[in-house]
Amino acid sequence: MDLVNHLEGRLLFAVPKKGRLNQATLDLLSGSDIQFRRETRLDIALVKNHDLALVFLPAADIPTFVGEGRVDLGITGRDQVAEHEALSPPTEDTGVEEVLDLGFGKCSLQVQVPEKGSITHAKELVGMNVVTSFVGLTEKYFAHLEGQEHQNGVMNGDVPLKHKLRTKIKYVGGSVEAACALGVADGIVDLVESGETMKAAGLKAIDTVVDSKAVLIKSKHPSNQKLVDLIASRIRGVISAQKYVLCQYNVPRTLLEAATHITPGKRAPTVTALEEEDWVAVSSMVEKNRIATVMDELTAVGATDILVLDIANSRTD
Ligand SMILES: Nc1ncnc2c1ncn2[C@@H]1O[C@H](COP(=O)(O)OP(=O)(O)OP(=O)(O)O)[C@@H](O)[C@H]1O
Ligand SMILES: O=P(O)(O)OC[C@H]1O[C@H](OP(=O)(O)OP(=O)(O)O)[C@H](O)[C@@H]1O
């Protein structure tokens, strides 16, 4: 099938075709009941149950396609959005708008130097070689550092920023952490999550350029705003379901106030009468990362039969 000719009238949604954000994004789409079948090696997939087509692109390219309005929606890292904005500042019609923080893909873009070296502050890298895949953000970061020197009269304010930089910033597409050991760089600017890669390469972080998480973004004038809102609402439901569990328990009515103080719910807890007199059943949404403490506290106030259930999907405010 000639997919490109079937795109007419469909909202285009860019998803990371590989890398760290790929699987979590596919899980999110599946949880949102966005049904598609991707043919081997094809980067476009028509969605069966919506006027939507998925476009599989590198995470780094997604802000460009969405920012220029070629694609309506996208999922990528906030770091990639910031990098795109550093290289192509948004105008009235171009650039992207963040719709939702998706909660996964948490990492930070950090300035790193050899652990055993003498550099302890990013300012000491001014005038040296710095290697990165994030040239836009790194130039902006060092321009700011050098700008502090500019106030002391070191830099010439008439030359365009890029050429004013004394720090030599070089682009590499991957394995950035190898640059110092190979003698290409005095420092690097690269992503850190667990810190394992940095540690293995004998590097330490000395500053953070930007913190990142995966985000849902949209173009400034999407072709179908109603469908954008529907997709965003479905994704929001899946994220909220991932964040919460449903906690159910029985408690004597006399202890209800103390118990519901522990599980106030998103709006209010659901309280149902039990066949056994003076007892009630309570059901309430609780943040997943608090549930162990909440169960301890409920037990301490006299609640019994405490059950915790996963939420498959939700639609809450
Ligand atoms: N270690 C990590 N932990 C969590 N999120 C990360 C991590 N590394 C990268 N990311 C996020 O995933 C995005 C894509 O990075 P990733 O390295 O997977 O890209 P990629 O598309 O596979 O490109 P490349 O081929 O350059 O590796 C990053 O911009 C960042 O938002
Ligand atoms: O702090 P950590 O948990 O070790 O993660 C950080 C690493 O993850 C990313 O690279 P990735 O493994 O995606 O490969 P890449 O170097 O090809 O980008 C990033 O560029 C770091 O190298």
Image (cartoon, helix red, strand yellow):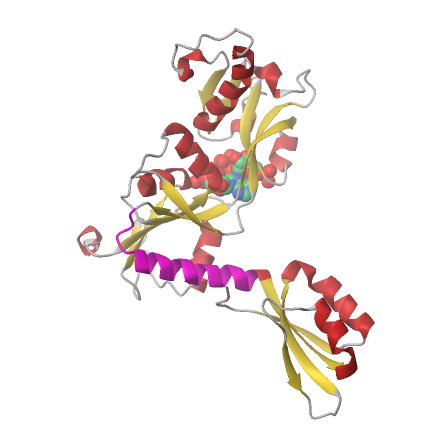
Does the magenta stretch mainly form a helix, a strand or a loop?
helix
38, 96: nearer the viewer: 96
Position of residue 16 relative to residue 138, above or below, is below
* Residue 127 makes an appearance in the image: no
Whether residue 240 appears in this view of the structure is: yes
Residue drawn 74% across the image and 75% down it: 257
Image quarter (top left, top right, bottom left or bottom right) of the N terminus: bottom left
Q: Residue at x 50, y 52 (%)?
A: 102
Could you say where residue 106 lies in the image, as x and y percent from the top left?
56, 44
Q: Is residue 252 above or below residue 103?
A: below
At a point 61% along the width and 28% down the height, the residue shown is 207
Q: How many marks do you count on the picture?
A: 0
The foreground one among 301 and 168 is 301
As drawn, is 217 to the left or to the right of 178?
left
Residue in front for this viewpoint, 59 or 211: 211
Left or right: where does residue 80 sit relative to residue 240?
Answer: left
- Picture coordinates of residue 94, whole percent (x, y): 31, 38
The answer to if 232 sits in the magenta stretch is yes
169 lies left or right of 57 = right
Could you say where residue 110 lies in the image, as x and y percent from the top left?
58, 30
Q: Is residue 254 magenta?
A: no
Residue depicted at x 64% and y 37%: 196
The span shown in magenta is 221-242
Compared with residue 210, is residue 179 higher up or lower down, i.e. above or below?
above
Task: Locate residue 2, reporting x and y percent.
Answer: 18, 53
